[in-house]
Image: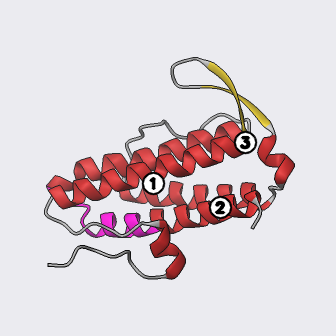
Amino acid sequence: MDAAEQVRRLWRHGAWADAALLAALRDVAHTPDVAPAWREYAHVLGAQEVWLSRLEQRPARAAVWPTLTPAEAEALAEELQAGYAAYVAALDGPALDRLVPYTNSAGQSFVTAAGDILLHAALHGQYHRGKVNVLLRQAGLEPVPTDYIAYVRGAPAATTRP
């Protein structure tokens, strides 16, 4: 498997994981202790939008830490899934090496390879999905399996035995 295909697989996994988390969060949206998990999930989407805007060299349509209603989160998640799907579908090896100039949220300018941005955004999303699951567990709710291996094999990852 070449690098471009691996990046496409990572983004299909991310879309799957985001959809699973959104479904679970939507089901418990009115539970008071879930607000921190919603904030963390909204950050996953906000950061993905900011990175996609940098890749596409356009203004971001969401803040890095947006405040989103469940309906807004669903709409943004759908836009991002379509946006990243289109972006990564067009990738080939040289496109991964394309340098992308951008300014971060602290006002610093950088130039980074598109492939590194895509890998960072995928890893960043998974890190924060894990935090969402910790926050769900702290609220007395079940976490949502978002592991890559669960996506690949279509079954949740192993858990500890009693």
**Please, what is the three-letter code of the amino acid marked with disc 3?**
Ala
The rendered magenta stretch, by its main secondary structure, is classed as: helix
Instruction: Look at the numbered disc 2 and give the secondary structure of its residue.
Output: helix
Tag 1: Cα neighbours inside 10 Å, few (<14), some, or many (≥20)? many
Residue 114 — which label?
3
Mark with earlier residue (2, 3): 2
Residue 22 part of the magenta segment: yes
**Pointer 1: what residue?**
126
Per the model, the C-alpha gap separating discs 2 and 3 is 18 Å
Label 1 close to label 3 by CB (< 8 Å):
no
**Please, what is the three-letter code of the amino acid marked with disc 2?**
Ala
Mark with earlier residue (1, 3): 3
Label 1 close to label 2 by CB (< 8 Å):
no
Per the model, the C-alpha gap separating discs 1 and 2 is 19 Å
**Residue 144, horizontal then vertical, whole percent:** 33, 68
**From what the image shows, is residue 112 above or below residue 123?**
above
Residue 17 part of the magenta segment: no
Tag 2: Cα neighbours inside 10 Å, few (<14), some, or many (≥20)? few
Q: Quadrant of the N terminus?
A: bottom right
In this picture, residue 9 sits left or right of residue 37: right
**Pointer 2: what residue?**
82
Question: Which image quadrant is residue 2 in?
Answer: bottom right
**Residue 61, horizontal then vertical, whole percent:** 58, 40
Rendering colour mode: secondary structure
**Residue 137, horizontal then vertical, whole percent:** 19, 61
Q: Quadrant of the C terminus?
A: bottom left
**From what the image shows, is residue 20 above or below residue 102?**
below
Per the model, the C-alpha gap separating discs 1 and 3 is 18 Å
Q: Which residues lie in the magenta part?
A: 19-32
Question: Which image quadrant is residue 21 in?
Answer: bottom left
Instruction: Look at the numbered disc 3 and give the secondary structure of its residue.
Output: helix
Q: Residue furthest front?
A: 161
